[in-house]
């Protein structure tokens, strides 16, 4: 009985660890935790900064671009300005293809499914992933994974927001995007 309990605890801990790994990049400084990605910023001159946000494989393009705007708004207020204008902005996707063998050795060896089936008058047959033959599908899983990184050069302004589609009031940006960052962490 104790062995069954300890196996159950190990499996639960493993599931929890794997689910924690399969989440989008939290809003955080780049390199501040085990999660890949985050924001960074660099002063260019008195009124200009370069900000960026890098997401992991589970962070959507929208999330990356929202986090970029949030960081730009925070940097703007930290420097005593009211808003910012996007001088330049780009979002770069990184696309890669992963090919895995679904029944290759894992942390528990070659544990996996096997089937027995009856083939008409020929009797019982069996199939397992170690038998070397395909069964209903190919032996490979092919996945395309896209991650995003957004960067922008921003220029600060004080006072009224300029009449421009690339000008943002920093307080309004924070009020509209910051609640979304809290939701994504829950």
Image: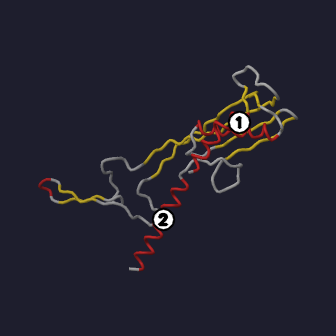
SS for dot 2: loop
Q: Which residue is at a point 72% across and 21% down the rendered structure image?
A: 164
Left or right: 57, with 139 as reference point = right
Look at 73% across and 30% down and name the residue there: 169
Residue 151: image tag: 1
**Residue displayed at 71% across by 25% down:** 166
Picture layout, residue 134 above or below residue 3: above
Q: Residue 111: where, in percent of width, then height?
A: 39, 64
Locate residue 61: give its quadrant: top right
Q: CA distance from mark 1 to mark 2?
A: 38 Å
Left or right, 44 with reference to 88: right
| Residue 103: x %, y % from top left | 41, 57
Residue holding disc 2? 107
**Callout 1: SS:** strand
Q: Residues within 10 Å of mark 1 (few under 14, many from 20)?
A: many
**CB of mark 1 within 8 Å of CB of mark 2?**
no
The residue nearer to you, when weighing 138 against 70, is 70
């Amino acid at each position: 009985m104790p062995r069954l309990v300890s196996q159950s605890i190990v499996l639960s801990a493993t599931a929890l660890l794997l689910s924690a790994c399969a989440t989008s990049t939290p809003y955080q400084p780049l390199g501040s935790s085990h999660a890949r990605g985050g924001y960074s910023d660099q002063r260019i001159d008195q009124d200009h900064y370069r900000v960026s946000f890098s997401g992991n494989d589970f962070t959507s393009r929208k999330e990356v671009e929202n986090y970029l705007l949030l960081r730009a708004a925070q940097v703007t207020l930290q420097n005593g300005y009211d808003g910012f204008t996007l001088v330049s902005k780009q979002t770069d996707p990184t696309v890669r293809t992963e090919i895995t063998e679904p029944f290759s050795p894992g942390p528990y060896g070659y544990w996996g499914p096997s089937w027995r089936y009856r083939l008409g008058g020929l009797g019982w047959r069996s199939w397992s992933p170690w038998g070397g033959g395909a069964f209903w599908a190919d032996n490979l899983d092919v996945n395309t994974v896209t991650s995003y990184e957004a960067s922008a050069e921003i220029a600060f302004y004080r006072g009224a927001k300029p009449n421009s589609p690339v000008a943002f009031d920093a307080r309004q940006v924070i009020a509209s995007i910051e609640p979304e960052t809290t939701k994504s962490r829950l």
